[in-house]
Image (spheres, helix red, strand yellow):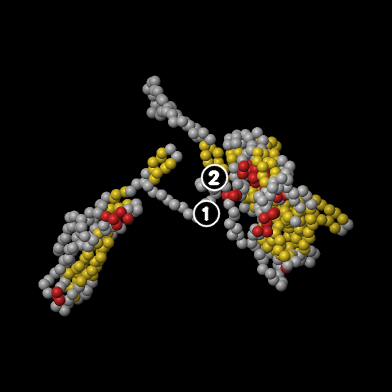
Amino acid sequence: MIKVILSKRSTHRTSPILIRFGVDDSKEIGTSCDLAFSTRQTMTQLSILSVSYRQVFSHQFQFPFTESHNFSTMNTLLWSSALLHTHCETLISWLNGRYIESEHLLTWLRYPLDVIETTQHWRLSTSIERAITVRYGPTDRAYICYRHTHPYRGKVLVSFKKQATTNISPIKLELKNIAQVCYWGLPGGLIRSDDDIPPIDRKIPIEPQLQRAYIMQPTITCERVDNAQQILLSQFSYTSTRGQFSATGNIKFCSRIDMERAIGHELKLTINGYEFIVMCEQAATSSKFANSSYSANIRSRFALLSAPYARATNYTNSVDKTAAGIMSDILENSGWTLDNQMIDYPVPKGAFSYRGLTPATALLKVANSIGAILDIDDTNKKVSVVPEWPVNPWSAEQATPDVILNESLILEHNTRDTIQPEYNAVFVRGEQQGVACKIKRSGTAGDMYARDIVDSLITDNQAARQRGTCELARSGNKQESTIRTKLLSTLPPIRPSMLVGINYSDSLYKATCDSTTLSASINNQGAITVNQTIKVISNV
């Protein structure tokens, strides 16, 4: 066995050592192994690795010879770091007509690791660090918090006058956290807010295909949520409107027993595959000669947070909050989640309060203060706070609609014009701790003023801009269109505040959905008819 030990670092990129056996090259038996070591410059380029090994290695070469009728070779390479590049070749030759077995074993000994640590040094408002991470792509909005005051550096002096009698120290030091103000926005950068950035409109509108005929197979089922007991209906009507916290409607039962089973319970209605969860209340009975009918009023599931199911409470923000934080407090312990799609802003301590309001009414009050409405998802128990005008009426023609109705799906189309003053500026201000702002429509002179808006939640410029924009969008002459269409798998229920494109009479115009009514009925022969009627508003 031959052992070769390299005791110091080579100065060349390739090893100068070459081991040969025998005199006659034609009958030579041996192994040629080249070891390439990286230079200092290469090592510097590879220093980004988190760990590296010491560059001291011990090499062993073993070449036992055995005669056998079978030939085999085994090469074992153990890499200890990325700083070593190895290239080995095994040369095999004949001897007396028999095969020679050569075993090549290359073992590297490992040494303790050298760990590269990243440290940060803070000096005033700048930070210096060795490791820098660069992120790219769109930035998600998040809560940005900052402190009102920064305390001076101090010290705590603790004096012990007598020896403690127990092992547990009776002294407890408590340092209170500094109050913070948080708002919802884009972190970092010099951009004031995301509402100043032109939106990248990548949404794809819902547009059913234009067909000569549509196969309609409407279905309607009704059952109680608590025990899945089936309820038979003959008629159903369900209306959602901007400015309401819950949808309202009416259902007509097939019998008195069905009415008694449904009153006071949550019902799950499935119409053409779309689920609606409502609260059945206020039963009504109508009796005529040889004919009786039984019906009841319904409200959406969010009505459980209003009277008579939820009690009225009082509220005052005792600490600094944000508008989203106040809305989260209103929904606390209710089982509902909040999805705030408005620009959040800080609300100082004691700036907002209400008295004798249920959670549903209070949440609607906060939403209306910043020019928003409530979009309720009763199935998942989620409340979305969305703008009353997601797209300003004067900019609707350049926006991408949420849904497009073609002429083949429009069963009825009625329009009427409304005349009202048009404004291009409005003063919006808060109360004791609010701000006062003039909101002007871009591209106008800003000389036609609407009535002043005063609200306790106008505590930031962002709140004033959102509320003022909503007031200006309401003004001006409008065209109201009432459209009756179908409910299909490719045409889901249209929700209030959606931007709807109407392709009618060889023209396409866009309008904001103000209300939607879903109706279903079953005649005496069992035929089911399902329609949805929407009212949309656009500028004349």
Distance (Cα) linking label 1 and label 2: 16 Å
Q: Position of residue 356 (x, y in %)?
A: 70, 37
Query: Is residue 122 shown above or below 411?
Result: above
Q: Quadrant of residue 161?
A: top left
In front: 447, or 328? 447
Quadrant in which the C terminus appears = bottom right
Give the label on residue 317, or none.
none
Give the label on residue 143, or none.
2
Whether residue 438 is visible here, answered yes or no, is: yes
Mark 1: few/some/many CA within 10 Å (<14, 14-19, 20+)? few
Tag 1: amino acid: Pro
Tag 2: amino acid: Tyr
Mark 1 highlights which residue? 138
- Counting residues from the start of the chain, the first of labels 1 and 2 encountered is 1
Quadrant in which the N terminus appears = bottom left
136 lies left or right of 286: left
137 lies left or right of 354: left
165 lies left or right of 292: left
The residue that appears at 20% across and 58% down in the rendered structure is: 10
Whether residue 492 is visible here, answered yes or no, is: no
